[in-house]
Amino acid sequence: MGLDVQALREEFPILQRQIDGHPLVYLDNAATTQKPQCVIDAITHYYSHYNANVHRGAHRLADEATKAFEAARDTIAGFINAAQREEVIWTTGTTEAINLVSHGLAHILEPGDEIIATQLEHHANLVTWQQACKASGASFKLAPITETGELDLAAFEALLNSNTKFVAFPHASNALGTLNPIKALTAKAKAVGAWVLVDGAQGIAHERVDVQDIGCDFYAFSAHKIYGPMGMGVLWGREELLRDWPVWQTGGEMISTVTYTSAEWNVLPYRLEAGTPNVGGAIAFGRAVQWYQQLNVAEVHAHEQALLASCTEQLSTLEGLTIHGTAPNKVAVVSFTMNEGHPADIGFLLDRQAIAIRTGHHCAEPLMAHLGVPGTARASFAAYNTLSEVDALAQALGKVKMMLA
Ligand code: PMP
């Protein structure tokens, strides 16, 4: 039967918005997805009915908040097939999750050790490792990409050696859409004994994620890219690593006992969660994942791939338009430039036609430099986008071309 996209759209109040009298066409989902009513309700309900600090309170509200907060952790653990709920660490997003790991790594690595990342990285999965290398004296290497925007697997493998202590790569590229063979990459890195982190920011809402099956050590993702709230994310890590991972933020909650001169750390997951958490955010994140899980994920996948195929096909017919990232395996992201104008002009002129895309370097400045472009215009799709929205984009780009010519 396929995904009932119209029914899905009705769950998203923002999709009913008009821009200058035209229906909003929201194609900036790689930046952030919109939120269904049930997620918005989960936040409102928390703040209107049981807002309280968690774990410490001796009253009804604190008890309810704690239960819902920890139940959300169970939901996420189940969603990614974590072996233990304690492996799910709340963070403010992918960026903070990666920082938690890189901060620890800076204390663990030594001169002579090597970290490998890729030319595809978002700054969050790049600058973090540069810093860890600077702090520890380890060296930093980058696996190159091919013309199509895919990782050069032979070159990746050639970089691996007994000094490789840590390997990081994105599940999917936010700038090009390339979907990486994360299980195979992980296996290669594990074969030389390295720890592996997958930046799942662009994978979590499009691909089935089973962290045990992937075989990685860390998987980081943000709630706001999978229909959940902003300011919320998860670091999943294997228990035997997280148990002893250097603590990074200290303060309340992450301790077991404290004296005026010293402290002992709490057990997982709390030892890596200092301070009052974003309780409402965690609960709403859990709700978003439950909502997503009740969709038929195979249907969502097929629908998004149909959007990608249609967009790629239609945009390819526009003369002077170049699509950057032509890997056979992609998430529904189409990044492009036009001979007629700068990406910022394209974005502006599409906005005038009620079409929201993203333009610029997509927090992947080195990748843009590698491609030899100042930035790109990027259309990115979610489950609620329609084929007619893709048509609208293609038609609008035809107009943009004329306006800029
Ligand atoms: N990595 C990738 C591939 C991303 O697309 C993003 C978000 N654009 C991030 C990391 C950072 O995510 P956040 O800003 O939610 O922390």
Image (cartoon, helix red, strand yellow):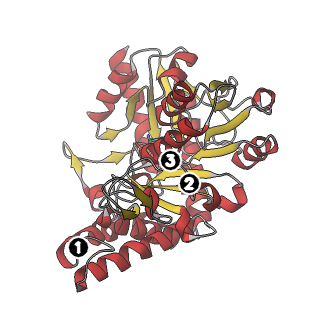
Label 1 environment density (alpha carbons within 10 Å; few <14, some 14–19, many ≥20) = many
For label 3, the SS is loop
The amino acid type of the residue labelled 3 equals Ala
User: What's the residue at 49%, 33% (across, down)?
Assistant: 128
* Residue at the spot of label 3: 201
In the picture, residue 5 is in which quadrant? bottom left
Q: Mark 1 points at which residue?
A: 52
Label 2 to label 3: alpha-carbon separation = 10 Å
Q: Name the residue under label 2.
A: 206
**Identity of the amino acid at label 2?**
His
Residues at discs 2 and 3 in contact (Cβ within 8 Å): no
Q: Mark 3 to mark 1: distance in Å?
A: 29 Å
Q: Is label 3 within 8 A of ligand 1 (CB to nearest ligand atom)?
A: yes
| Residues at marks 2 and 1, CA–CA distance in whole angstroms | 34 Å
Residue 54: where, in percent of width, then height? Answer: 30, 72
Q: In the shown orientation, is residue 258 left or right of residue 80?
A: left
Q: In this view, does 255 lie to the left or right of 47?
A: right
Q: Which of 296 and 405 lies nearest the eye of the viewer?
A: 296
Q: Is mark 2 on a helix, strand or loop?
A: loop
* Residue located at (54% from left, 70% from top): 85
Q: Is residue 63 above or below residue 368?
A: below
Q: In which quarter of the image is the C terminus?
A: top left
